[in-house]
Image (cartoon, helix red, strand yellow):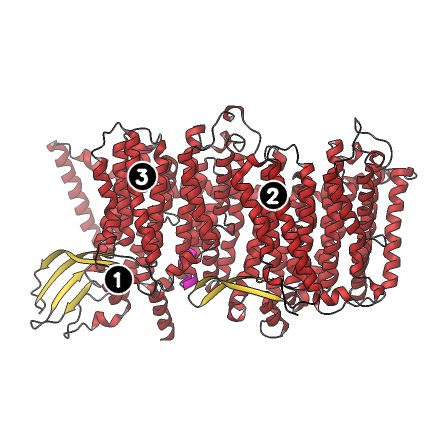
Amino acid sequence: MESSFPWLTLLTFSPIIGLLVLLFIPGTNSRALRTAAIVTTLVPLGLSLWLFASYDAANPNAFREQVDWITIALNHEAVNIGSSAYVFQYHLAVDGLSLPLVALAALVAVMAALASVHIKKRWKAFYVWFLLLETGMLGVFLARDLILFFLFFELTLIALFFLIGIWGSLNREKAANTFLIYNGLGSALMLIAFVLLISTAGASLNATEQGGDLVYSGDYATIAANLTSGESLTNLPGGYDNPFALSDGMRWTIFILLLAAFGIKLPVLPLHTWMLRVHAEAPPSVVMIHSGVLLKMGGYGLIRFGIGLFPELAEDASFVLALLGAVSVLYGAVLAFVQREFRLVLAYSSVSHMGIVLLGIASLNEIGLQGAVFQLVSHGLISALLFLIVGSLYERTGTTELEELGGLARPMPFMSGVLLAAGMASLGLPGLSGFIGEFLAFLGLFETMKWVTAIAAIGVILAAVYILRSVLKITFGPQQERYAVLKDARLIEAVPMIALFAFIVLLGVYPSVLTDTMQGSFDNIIAHLNTRMGG
Amino acid sequence: MATVYSQYAWLVPVFPLAAFLILTAFGRGLKQTGAIVAVLGSFGALALSALVLIEHLGGADEYNDSFHWIKIGGYALTAGFDVTNLTALMLVVVSLVAFLVNIYSMGYMKDDERMTVFFGYVALFTFSMLGLVLADNLLTLYIFWELVGVCSFLLIGFWYQKPEAKAAAKKAFIVTRIGDVGLLIALLLLFWYMPDHDLSFAAIENVFGQTGLITEGITTLIAILIFVGAVGKSGQFPLHVWLPDAMEGPTPISALIHAATMVAAGVFLVARTFPIFEASQAALDTVAWVGAFTAIFAASIAIAQNDIKRILAYSTVSQLGYMMMAIGLGSVTAGMFHLFTHAFFKALLFLGAGSVIHAVHTQDIHEMGGLGKTMKTTAWTFAIGALALAGIPPLSGFWSKDAILAEALHANPALFVVGIAAAFLTALYMSRLFFLVFAGNPKAGGEAHESPATMTVPLIVLAVLAVIAGFVEMPFSGTGWFGEWLTGHAAEHEGAALVMLVSTAIGLLGIYLGWLIYVKGAISRDVVTSRAPWLTRMLERKYYIDEIYHAVFTVSLRAIGRACDAFDRHVVGGAVRLAGGAAFWTGRAATRMQSGQPQSYGLYVVIGLVILVAAIAGRRFW
């Protein structure tokens, strides 16, 4: 069933519609602004959940919107063909890989909008950037044209830059600058890779009487097909040889550029230092999105563009990827153990958990890849929940230094309980989502690299060590006098906490809800690797 | 025989789960009602378990049901439950002890403001433990295995404001997690080596029952890794350190989780995956020797401890060692038999200790004394428990320990000697504990009172069970019925009469020695301390294991962390700053060059020219 209504466009741009409404609300009316923003974020959530429910893994093309957008004619008389042009499309689609992340982004956005109750100034500008950010991240997961993807990706950068730089804590401007420079660098690498791809593997030739129309497009499917089936590159219809056939060296160059570009985002060691600052300086509700969704764009990019386009190279590099993953897992965990600031504990914990994503990717089998995506979604939910709590905690205590905190379970039993539960999810307790992602990634990788998996599994112990150290430091122990008067979570704080935790439990108890959606998403990659092995 | 109740066995854990959900949702408002909800939940589980057990005593078939939990490509991970005679027995043990502990806690925890939270955690634990028992495959078992661990953690840290409770909870979680990683890796290995990636116990039995399907090396590796998990959970050496500290939790928890059920899960796990161990003699030997060593090692520590709960905790570690030894000797029957009897008499001892602590508000046995006169019910039930533990006939512990010793004598005399020595120490530390607490003159200030009926009735019930539980399997009944029913083949008891004589004599000797020292005073209490103070000190300090672990693991982990932190800050961060700084300063320098002064531009031109000429000239010599 091909849907004629542009549901995906509506999903992506509904935050912009809300933004337009927001513009008519006076900037001083924080309550109305907040309500409008929250209501706005509910629209993409509703749409994405509906998409999720109606998505059929057997028929992934039900929702697809594809129109030519920008056409740049080229003067190409040197080769004997009719016409040639760059054609960039407005092309949105969902599949089992992007759908879970779209739903995650929409969900975390709602929760972060609720958590933005802690924002104390310039509400209007805040929500404008916030909603732009949401459109950007939804677009990233839906775009199927390289240029369109790039535009959405950049939109998230700019929006986040302002969100950190204006509403962050003490060193916000420095954090925003570091963020922009690092990610700008990543974007530059990505753009180079994309341009190389478009002008080589993006080529397709439609045979006509004059010899054919040569079209360079950013269409993901075209590029993937050209790259993975070597034939169409060297043997285009019409007897035309593509002069831009990719050499092995070129393939490796592009592959490494993509790894670096998305590796910065994930982040992979040693490209992680920028995100520490963001975790520590950005307002907690923005970190919910940053850690909950934006980092996931790195993992998504690695899977979609890195191994999706270059499965053989990924296979050749799989040991290095797995090693990087294992080192990230252990390095992040050990560092999380010695941090004195809770937000930095969580930042290094993200490094560790994203290492597990890398392990899943490196497995290059269906179990591991699903584990990687599962881990992305699960970590998104868990870190959103953790930073939601951090926000509420910080508002009350004015600090997230571990040394300053203690005994909060007495004045705040509910919030402490949720913090402990979130910590348990983070350390991979079965029954909660963290376990499934971790387990599937390990299980997948174990097929090919037993020792690397076994070493990385030590991270499971270390996770317990650093999570319990910090969480128990905050909530357990004798009550401190100055915190005795603190109030437990208000309703507007409790609702997103319960909602996020409910999703964490849902995925932990009934993981099929996600794995069934992903069913078959990696068939292309795996089939390609199998034929390679067979041949 | 067809099954009626067994197919509904999955409902057994649902009762306590429902209780947990109700208690969590309605929270502290429930007060005493909360306790009733918890008791009802565990009663529901008990009633249904009893029906299932009765059905299986009548010879019902095994019942199994499972479904695809996660399906990925051609692989499926299943979840399911299995009702065998072994699981039916365990269901009753768990739900019975849980039920009694719930009732006991109504009295013990009466004044605690977080009582509903307590009962909620207990209900969650009961759910998880029953789930663990019912699991039909290793993955499902692992999930519940972790859940019981987290419940144990929550309950050890129940009095979260006490720094000791916090530390103990953390330690319990982390140390058992070390074992869990072993089990996790075993799980990964099994998944990829088992035909059809089937992790069910039935398939394991099938595959490992035949030789050659899986190589011996891999079999041994898997078995040892599973055993590592069991070592963590069941407090075997060298991962025993968390269990004595776990006594920081409320005493009913010590009885339920850290004596009767969860800590026995390791033994249960080895019994459940026994076909893997059976296929590897090396693995069996490892299990037997680790168990035997733990049995005597922990018993020796128990002699020098002064905290009533810690003595019992080390005793638990020691008895779990016996069970492991039995299974390592190849007798699942003997191991499970001892698990069965131990669950009752050790729960009884802990609840009795709780009753004492409740009355005198101290845990130091040297501050107690003469309680036999004021707390009659507690005293005589405790005496039954102590005698059962010491292995005095005809109490239950005698029969089950006897079964283990008989196996040892039959299979490996060295282990028999270790077992007998540990039995002597057991009798000694129990008589020391009993006489110091209940005999002599009262020391603790104020009159101690007997506990309320909610606490004494469970004691009486457990005392009855501690007496009779052993009768299910007596060597001279000659039938070996219990073993036949449990594992499908009857155990043999050669030389049983000799073993019975020796172990009874050893037990009585231990008690007599205790009586001589602590009641009669015929032997000075300082007889060892005065001659070998180092020995007493070493036992008191528990062989310095905690100190060693702290130095080796905690300190080094922190050092590694600090080193990595410095690396991250200065090397990784430094490289970033350097790159950023280089770009910045290049830009700064280039800006400065644009000064607008012709003289400096002229200078740059001259410098450039010199460099150029030098470069060209230099090429000649190159």
Residue B167, horizontal then vertical, whole percent: 60, 38
Q: Secondary structure at mark 1?
A: helix
Q: Is residue A347 visible?
A: no
**A179 in magenta:** no
Q: Label for residue A250?
A: 1
Q: Which chain letter goes with mark 2?
A: B
Label for residue B37? Answer: 2
Mark 2 vs mark 1: give the one in front: 2
- Cα separation, mark 3 vs mark 1, equals 47 Å
Tell me if I can see residue B525 in this picture.
yes
Q: Quadrant of the N terminus of chain A?
A: bottom left
Please provide percent x and percent y for residue A150.
Answer: 24, 51
- Is residue A250 left or right of A496 when viewed as pictured? left
The vertical placement of B416 against B98, above or below, is below
Q: Which residues are magenta?
A: A358-367
Q: Give the left or right position of residue B45, taking residue B461 as reference.
A: left
- Asked whether A135 or A526 is in front, the reply is A135
Residue in the picture at 49% in, 25% down: A485
| Alpha-carbon span between mark 2 and mark 1 | 68 Å
Residue B186 position, x and y percent, is 57, 61
For badge 2, the amino acid type reads Val
Q: Is residue A361 magenta?
A: yes
The chain under label 1 reads A
Q: Residues within 10 Å of mark 2 (few under 14, many from 20)?
A: many
Name the chain letter of the residue that bears numbered label 3.
A
The front one of A534 and B78 is B78
Tell me if residue A504 comes above or below residue B370 in the rendering: below
User: Disc 1 marks which amino acid?
Assistant: Met
Asked if badge 2 and badge 3 are on a common chain, one would say no
Q: Is residue A306 above or below residue A132?
A: below
Please give the label number shown on residue A38: 3
